[in-house]
Image (spheres, rainbow, N blue to C red):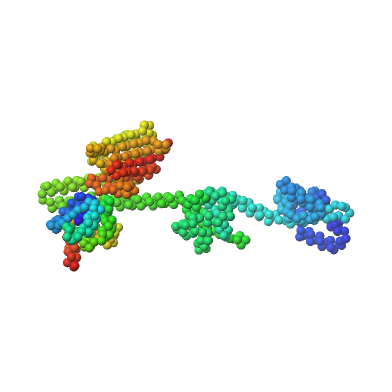
């Protein structure tokens, strides 16, 4: 899942992911609030229903209405088994040390990535997720 | 020694010599007849006045002469001694060379044996030195009192050991607004704020306790309250002294509310500036990151069509960056100091702004209604006023509801003079602002909703607010969702 208020960045990031993982299933949101609503509804569905739960969320920090950190707070408040394994990475052009530290401290956040996204960085993320799945 | 013999005729020679010796060496005395004329003055009296005995005998003793300012005292003196009673007191006179002499005096009337009248023996003690020292102290005291009374910038309050106010100066009267008879005798805590957040001192005892642990003249802070219940911070030094076993406490205070207010404003401004820097740095960085990402993709792109898509996106990204940097340039207007003030031609400014905004999406569909009151005279900085209009109108255009059957987008600009104010109103019939977002519209980089078109990215209204505040004006927003928004700006109109 990609959450970014800038459509161009959404497009660029999607392209990079598709380059590494050809059959990647990607859902994008330009509003963090809509993304939260989507995840909430997914968490409430029964197993029989259609489900698309992302493995990874790439989340922009500076967005109107609801920013990346507010998203993380909301997400932590969602109480659902199926959402527990989602890894969220903050993706921002900010190199501000405070943002990086805040990201590091937030328990719902798995990492901080500086824009622009690159192929290597996508690969690395996917490796991280796979190792975690194998460990389970 | 004829006189003594005359007074005490039965005295023998030895006694006479002895008494004479004692009187001559250890006292200052004169003998006067019933009219106060000097019959005899001893050597020390003569020396004191710098006169010969011959010059004094037969003349009235001028020490016993009435001084105009003290006539009652002298009247009483004469009444007393003429009744044959002793008089004690202090007399003042002048020596031959005009030096003032103070004498502590005892006048003893002596009844003569053959007449029914009195002679007067007057014994003196020279207290001129003591008196002059007392006079100096008196003058100094008067001077210090005057200085203390006239100090208007500082507050001086004196209390006794219980904290009861026993003295205060004009500065204190002015700062606290109590007349002296209302405050003297009241406890000092009357002037102190009870619940103070930096509650080091809430009462007099706390202060005194602190004083004991203080190094000399350390400056402390305190929140005071005046007669009208207004609170204000003071800086003060506290000192104490003891007179005749009683403790006194002196508070010397300075009202520092102006300085504190200034400090707070400075802190606030610095905080704003820091946030502005941080947000600007980030927002400037964002389009570069996007462009970099796009260029990385372009390197691998094989098809012309694909390339076209990227180029179009790159253009949009650069467009974003340009809008942003323009916004920043506007913001920097705020901090540059030299703003030329001129008579503002509102019609010209608004025409200029509309010309500038012509390329904005939906501009063509909007009906602009401009109402400028005739004979408006307003002097200000044209650049700043133009920026205010640009951002307010741009904002109205951005949140337009697209035209349909029953709806024509409209932006109304009204300028008129009201009492001592200039009123500027920019209203639209667009999307409006949700109630919960109203408080935040002037925040830096606040955007109410996700936009598909690049806007000023949350800078615009922040800049407007800063300009209006800098020009000592106010800005207010009213809005209803899907009905429209109205911004009202008021500037003080300096005549």
Residue found at x 84% / y 53%:
B118
The C terminus of chain A lies in quadrant: bottom left
Rendered location of residue B405, percent (x, y): 23, 37
Q: Is residue A65 visible?
A: yes
Rendered location of residue B236, percent (x, y): 50, 55
Q: Is B213 left or right of B316, judged from the image as shown?
A: right
Q: Is A130 left or right of B60, judged from the image as shown?
A: left
Rendered location of residue B398, percent (x, y): 26, 43
Residue found at x 27% / y 50%:
A64
Residue found at x 49% / y 58%:
B202
The front one of B88 and A121 is A121
Residue found at x 88% / y 52%:
B115
* Residue sticking out furthest to the left: B303
Q: Is residue B211 visible?
A: no
* Residue sticking out furthest to the top: B374
Rendered location of residue B246, percent (x, y): 60, 61
Up the image or down, B194 lies above or below A133; here it is above
Picture quarter containing residue B420? top left
* Residue sticking out furthest to the bottom: A135
The N terminus of chain A lies in quadrant: bottom left
The front one of A47 and A110 is A47
The front one of A133 and B467 is A133
Tally of marks = 0
Up the image or down, B189 lies above or below B464; here it is below
């Amino acid at each position: 899942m990609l959450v970014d208020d800038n459509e161009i960045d959404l497009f660029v990031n999607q392209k990079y992911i598709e380059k590494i993982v050809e059959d990647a299933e990607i859902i994008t949101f330009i509003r963090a609030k809509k993304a939260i609503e989507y995840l909430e509804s997914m968490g409430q569905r029964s197993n029989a229903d259609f489900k698309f739960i992302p493995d990874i969320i790439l989340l922009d920090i500076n967005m109107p209405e609801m920013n990346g950190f507010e998203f993380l707070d909301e997400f932590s408040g969602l109480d659902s088994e199926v959402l527990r394994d989602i890894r969220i990475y903050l993706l921002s052009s900010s190199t501000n040390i405070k943002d990086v530290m805040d990201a590091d401290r937030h328990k719902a956040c798995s990492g901080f990535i500086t824009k622009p996204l690159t192929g290597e960085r996508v690969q690395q993320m996917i490796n991280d997720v796979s190792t975690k799945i194998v460990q389970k | 020694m004829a006189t003594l013999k005359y007074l005490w005729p039965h005295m023998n020679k030895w006694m006479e010599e002895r008494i004479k010796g004692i009187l001559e060496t250890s006292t200052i005395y004169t003998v006067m007849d019933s009219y106060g004329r000097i019959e005899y003055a001893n050597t020390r009296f003569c020396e004191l006045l710098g006169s010969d005995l011959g010059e004094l005998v037969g003349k009235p003793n001028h020490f016993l002469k009435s001084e105009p300012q003290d006539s009652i005292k002298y009247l009483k003196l004469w009444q007393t001694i003429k009744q044959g009673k002793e008089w004690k007191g202090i007399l003042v006179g002048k020596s031959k060379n005009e030096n003032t002499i103070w004498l502590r005096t005892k006048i003893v009337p002596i009844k003569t044996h053959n007449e029914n009248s009195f002679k007067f023996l007057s014994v003196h003690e020279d207290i001129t030195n003591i008196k002059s020292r007392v006079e100096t102290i008196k003058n100094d005291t008067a001077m210090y009192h005057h200085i203390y009374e006239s100090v208007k910038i500082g507050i001086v309050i004196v209390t006794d050991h219980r904290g009861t106010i026993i003295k205060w100066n004009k500065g204190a009267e002015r700062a606290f607004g109590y007349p002296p008879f209302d405050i003297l005798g009241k406890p000092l805590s009357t002037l102190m704020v009870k619940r103070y957040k930096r509650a080091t001192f809430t009462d007099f005892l706390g202060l005194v306790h602190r004083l004991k642990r203080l190094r000399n003249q350390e400056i402390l802070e305190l929140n005071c309250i005046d007669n009208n219940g207004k609170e204000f911070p003071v800086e003060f030094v506290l000192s104490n002294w003891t007179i005749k076993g009683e403790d006194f406490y002196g508070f010397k205070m300075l009202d520092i509310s102006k300085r504190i207010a200034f400090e707070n404003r400075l802190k606030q401004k610095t905080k704003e500036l820091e946030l502005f820097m941080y947000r600007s740095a980030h927002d400037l960085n964002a389009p570069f990151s996007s462009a970099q990402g796009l260029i990385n993709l372009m390197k691998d792109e094989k098809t012309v069509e694909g390339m076209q898509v990227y180029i179009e996106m790159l253009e949009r990204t650069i467009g974003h960056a340009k809008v942003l940097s323009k916004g920043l340039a506007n913001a920097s207007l705020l901090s540059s100091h030299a703003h030329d003030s001129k008579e503002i031609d509102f019609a010209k400014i608004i025409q200029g702004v509309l010309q500038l905004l012509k390329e904005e999406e939906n501009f063509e569909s909007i009906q602009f209604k401009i109402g400028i009151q005739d004979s408006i005279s307003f002097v200000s900085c044209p650049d700043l006023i133009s920026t205010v209009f640009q951002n307010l109108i741009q904002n109205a255009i951005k949140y337009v509801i697209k035209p349909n059957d029953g709806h024509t987008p409209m932006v109304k600009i009204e300028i008129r003079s009201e009492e001592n104010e200039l009123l500027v109103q920019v209203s639209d019939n667009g999307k409006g602002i949700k109630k919960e977002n109203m408080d935040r519209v002037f925040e830096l980089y606040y955007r109410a909703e996700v936009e598909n078109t690049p806007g000023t990215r949350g800078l615009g209204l922040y800049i407007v607010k800063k300009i209006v505040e800098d020009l000592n004006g106010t800005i207010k927003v009213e809005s209803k969702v899907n009905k429209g928004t109205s911004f009202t700006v008021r500037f003080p109109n300096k005549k």
